[in-house]
Image: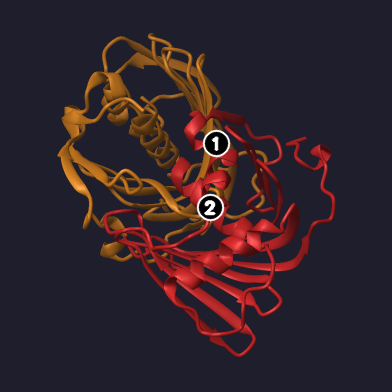
Chain colours: A red, B orange
Amino acid sequence: MKSLLQLGLVVLFVMAAQPAQARSLTPVEGLEALRRSFAGLQDFTAELTQEKQLSIMKKKLVMQGMIRFKKPDRFYLELAPPYSGKVLLKDTVLEQQLGAQGERQRIVLPPEQGLSRWFATVSRPITSIPEGMEVRAEQNGSLTSVVIRPAKGGQLKELTLVLQDDGTVRKLVLEERAGDRTVMTFRKTRRNIGLTEADFRLE
Amino acid sequence: MIRPFLLLLVSCLLAACAARQPLPNDSAVLTPGAVVETLSSTITLSLRTAEKNLAGRGVMVYRRPDQLRLILLSPFGTTVMEALVSGDQLTLAYPASGVAYQGKINELPAATGQRGFAMLRWVLASDAPAGAPHDGEMERLSSRGGIERISLQNGQVVEKNLPGGEQVRYRNHAVLAGVRLPLELLMMSAEGDRIRLTLEEPEVNIPLEDQMFTIPLQGLRLLPLSELKSP
């Protein structure tokens, strides 16, 4: 869960960054463009719709909410009723609260799994595709999509990012090997708006 | 310890689903003789122990008499854990770790909550005993040995206690599809761990296909349940 959360966070932050080039990209160019775009990002906020199609349920699980991020290591997710919940990550300290009166969960991650450490890693220039990973990047009109297939054996089968030509993230799709699929759509993304520590509290 | 307890909780919840006489706060009509044949619902689970607090959201399906599948999700919607109970068989899958455990429930190592599963039949036996008071308490010999205390309200079991300290409470009853359903269940283990399960938007007695009660194990390393370690 921790690794997936961190992967999701990295993807979200990269998505909220500066515009990707509106052209066909090689795999390395695709990842490098995402990395470069993150370099100009200090913080961002967006509204979120998360749709989960599970093999176990006939109907989609649809959640509405908002996310915030601030460099170097702050992340906040809040979901609206009926699936209300909050997630706060301060580098290595993950706090979660489900429901308005739900129990608060606190997990301290190992230092190597801290958010600042992950972003320090992804800030390095990308010169090659990690072994076992497949990347495709293409442009359709004003939308650019980057499809990442992690090395075989993990939980994620495929991760798809869709961005507008101004760099605003539109969609994130997570496909799990078991067949379940999560689609996150983002609206009203705002970057570098001066979020403060007060924006990253569970209260 | 936590994982089996969660399943036990769900089973507890379902055990209280059989239709009974209306409680005072009933606003819907019960169908005489109707019981929960299937249940599908999103859920929240929270656990409080002396060492930690844990919480998660997920989904579950149940089919009478003894099939139950539960999925716990991460905040980003990916699967953290899956569990399937079918008769006396239990499968636990952890996709992020690439591993799954399968075996009979009684093969669970004690340190991971075997005692909780051993309580399953006791919990499922939630029918009001013959001669039980309409409202009040009674005691009887427990199927697990010793004397159990049962609290009833309007002829329905609302709480059960074992001499060792285990307790199950059913709260926030609602009537769906003519069947009474507790939307919140609170359980306390003998060790003092508190677990709360809440149903969100439950659907009762809708058709559920067989595939909903199968955990996809492709790509996972399958190990005997006896090798499961405490989280």
Circle 2 SS class: loop
> Which residue is painted at 26% across and 20% down in the image?
B143
Along the line of sight, the residue nearer the viewer: A21 or B88: A21
**Which quadrant holds the C terminus of chain B?**
top left
- The percent coordinates of residue A166 (x first, y second) are 71, 76
Q: Would you say residue B227 is visible in this rendering?
A: yes
Measured as percent of width and height from the top left, residue B21 is found at 53, 42
Name the disc covering residue A114, or none.
1
Residue A138, image x and y in percent?
A: 50, 82
Residue at label 2? A124
In primary-sequence order, the first of circles 2 and 1 is 1
Q: Quadrant of the N terminus of chain B?
A: top left
Asked if B217 appears above or below B48 in the picture, the reply is below
Kind of residue at badge 2:
Arg
Helix, strand or loop at label 1? It is: loop
Tell me if residue A160 comes above or below residue B216 in the rendering: below
Amino acid type shown at disc 1: Gly
> Alpha-carbon distance for marks 2 and 1?
17 Å
Frontmost of labels 2 and 1 is 2
Instruction: Give A126 or A168, whichever is nearer the viewer.
Output: A126
Tell me where residue A64 sits by quadrant. bottom right
Q: To which chain does the residue with label 1 belong? A: A
